[in-house]
Amino acid sequence: DGGITQSPKYLFRKEGQNVTLSCEQNLNHDAMYWYRQDPGQGLRLIYYSQIVNDFQKGDIAEGYSVSREKKESFPLTVTSAQKNPTAFYLCASSTQRGRMANEKLFFGSGTQLSVL
Amino acid sequence: AQSVTQLGSHVSVSEGALVLLRCNYSSSVPPYLFWYVQYPNQGLQLLLKYTSAATLVKGINGFEAEFKKSETSFHLTKPSAHMSDAAEYFCAVTTASSASKIIFGSGTRLSIRP
């Protein structure tokens, strides 16, 4: 079955530690996204990528980094500079046929990150 | 820039009653609007989307939404609530010129009373 796989489902970070969240898709989608979800705040865009080897900052990129070396993969690193990393992180993808804005997002099942 | 506002962070209805979840948008150009549903500890799934073809949009699970430009609204409705509808619902907006930036509302948690 085609879809988006996020791992791990739960992740714990120690003070000063960088952690990496995995996101893999086999939908052959060009665009991939990372959102952060906090209770009562909805989803906020961290980073997005429209094509391999290119990505743009979203609204809350500080303290995060990404890479897009392969079309299928878009890992997110939460660095020690992110002082409040506890949240639910969602990866998504979509097609980008002619930059059509009405293409829906496909979401992974999320990673819950907590600080020890 | 575009934005969405969801009125009511929590809505509770009885099983069989009408469901109404409110969403108002702001956009200086014609918007594309979406409703997504999220079940606990899962990602989001698309319920329906408005892309200027028809103002009344029908989605999955019996939900529908009506685009009202004069009211800048895109409220989600379902005639008869089912226990399985209990979830969090998100309204989202984007435009043709900002296709890669999809803005989500803060969400509305829907509870169903037996």
Image (cartoon, coloured by chain):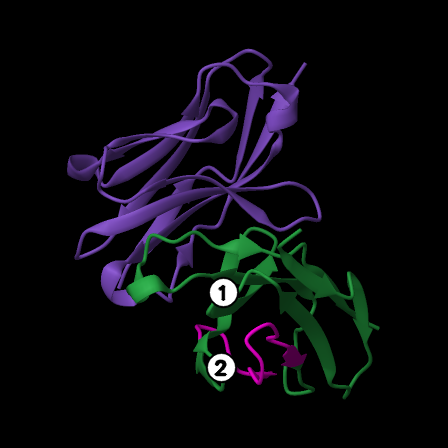
Can you see residue A41?
Answer: no
Q: Residue at x 49, y 63 (%)?
A: A44
A99 lies left or right of B6: left
Q: Chain of mark 2?
A: A
Whole-percent x and y of residue A101?
A: 32, 58
**Which residue is disc 2 drawn over?**
A52
The amino acid at mark 1 is: His
- In the image, residue B75 sits, relative to residue B52, either above or below, namely above
Residue at (73, 85) in percent of width and height: A18
Where residue B37 appears, as percent x and y from the top left, is 54, 40
Q: Is residue B93 magenta?
A: no
Q: Is residue B31 above or below residue B85?
A: below
Camera-side residue of A111 and B5: A111
Q: Chain of mark 1?
A: A
Looking at the rendered structure, the secondary structure element under dot 1 is loop
Q: What secondary structure is the stretch in magenta mostly built from?
A: loop
Chain B on-screen colour? purple
Per the image, the residue denoted by label 1 is: A29
Vertical comparison of A77 with A107: above or below = below
